[in-house]
Amino acid sequence: MKRVLAYLLVLVIVFTALPISFVNAATGGYYSTGTYRNIFVETGRTEAQVQDKLNTMFDKFFKGDTNNQRLFYESGTDEAYIRDTGNNDVRSEGMSYAMMICVQMDKKKEFDMLWKWSRNHMYQSSGQYKGFFAWQCNYSGGIMDTTPASDGDEYFAMALLFAARRWGNGTGIYNYEAEAQVILDAMLHQADDGVGVNMFDKTQNQVVFCPNGGSATFTDPSYHLPAFYELWALWAKNQNDRTTWSKIAATSREFFKKSTNSTTGLNPDYANFDGTPKDVSWSSGHADFRYDAWRVASNVCVDYAWWQKDAWASTTFAPKIQSFFKKEGVSTHGSNYTLAGSKLNSDHSPGLVAMNAVTAMASDAATAKPFVDELWNTAVPSGQYRYYDGMLYMLGMLHLSGNFKIWGAVPTVMCGDVNQDNVIDALDSAVLKSYLLGKITTLPSMQAADTNADSSVDAIDFAILQQYLLGKITTLPYGN
């Protein structure tokens, strides 16, 4: 033991004498590190200012003035719904987004009220849409259109899975895990009995626009959520489905590359499965970058921040779309464009401001700062058309503040496997040494490099790893 400690001391002295700039912030995907960037703080705000901003945002949308601020409306004593104040209806999109916001902000009461309303009034237990949620209801809970919207079901499932892991399960519809698993099963297998259409095309491994006839023959780029699919590949009850979800996640990442304009970084509202823009007969303009397409930037960059499985998001996508909107004017750009970049309107919408700001999650703070500042300086949406802008505003604020978390993430990291190749050897020592000498600025896993489990990576960790490789010590982490 004395020899080990003496060796550690020598290495620490050697490294301490070198001009090393230690970086203790975790790098790699959020799932593997468990550490979330607060990009508002990175760009100059304090933690207290950020928390105050989030509290104000929640209070206005959930408790504010009913005519100009509030989106959350109680129904009876234990149900509530989110109003689309521009269209005077209730949508599965808004209900599921709001549930996600509530689980992220630890608002269980509001979550349960929204879930009960959704489950009682939107969920369909029979017919061609069995297992899915109607996308549109009136304020009384009557279904206006039975067709499901795929993004709503996706967010319902993910919000419920997070709720199960954050708060635990109750009984009945409040057994969040069981309810989520039913939704996951329906998305892949609803039509296995010959009635209905699956929400994910089995051949294409892609989410469909909606599981209904011709609308299931194409997709919506903003419905692709590979960050979620990776979790379903870990958490789905059906073991065979886990492999399918993993394939779907990989397919979505490749689809983003195909559907993104190579010059502007813009995506269409709707697209064919090969990524080409899709127009539809019943509504014009969806081959352009319009309201649905705003969300693609968030989907791409959140997936990168959570998993870091494809550098394209950081090296190509984020710089390209940031460059386009900087050229258009970060504070003055419109909200609708052709994919080639011709402006279709001059509205500077808070929802798009929020989604553009989320590109910071696949970018360094300095480059993304203009977009982050623009969101910070944008007032909480109010007035008649506050619904869609408001939903995206809240999601964007949570992502950028590090408060949109992967509840239940239990990463499996082999201590000492610094380069994450599932072997602890001299290569790990070399990578860690390069990091400590400042030759590289990131590590595949900070957790694996922290060989004494003291929540920092420094010369002591290198010394311990060397002793492990020499057989002087036999277990890692050492000394904790």
Image: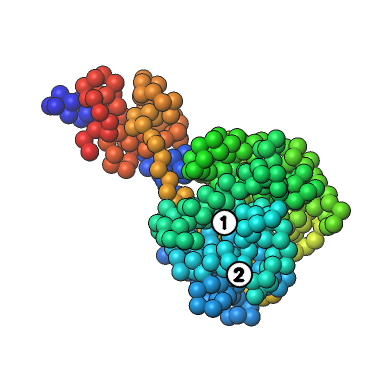
Q: Secondary structure at mark 1?
A: helix
Q: Tell me if 179 is positioned left or right of 374 in this view.
A: left
Q: Nearer the viewer, residue 149 or 211?
A: 211
Classed neighbour count for the residue bearing mark 2: other residues with Cα under 10 Å, few (<14), some (14–19), many (≥20): many
Amino acid of disc 1: Phe
Q: Does 440 sit left or right of 132 as displayed?
A: left
Residue count near mark 1 (Cα–Cα under 10 Å), binned few <14, some 14–19, many ≥20? many
Q: Position of residue 225 (x, y in %)?
A: 61, 46
Residue 295 shows in the view: no
Structural distance between the alpha carbons of marks 2 and 1: 14 Å
Label 2 belongs to which residue? 82
Q: Could you tell me which quadrant the N terminus lies in?
A: top left
Q: Which residue is mark 1?
A: 156
At 62% from the left edge and 67% from the top edge, which residue is drawn?
121
Which numbered marker is on residue 244? none
**Callout in the foreground (2, 1):** 1
174 to 313, vertically: above or below:
below
Please name the residue shown 20% across and 30% down the image: 9
Q: Quadrant of residue 373?
A: bottom right
The residue positioned farthest toward the right in the image shown: 281
Relative height, residue 289 to residue 75 (above, below): above
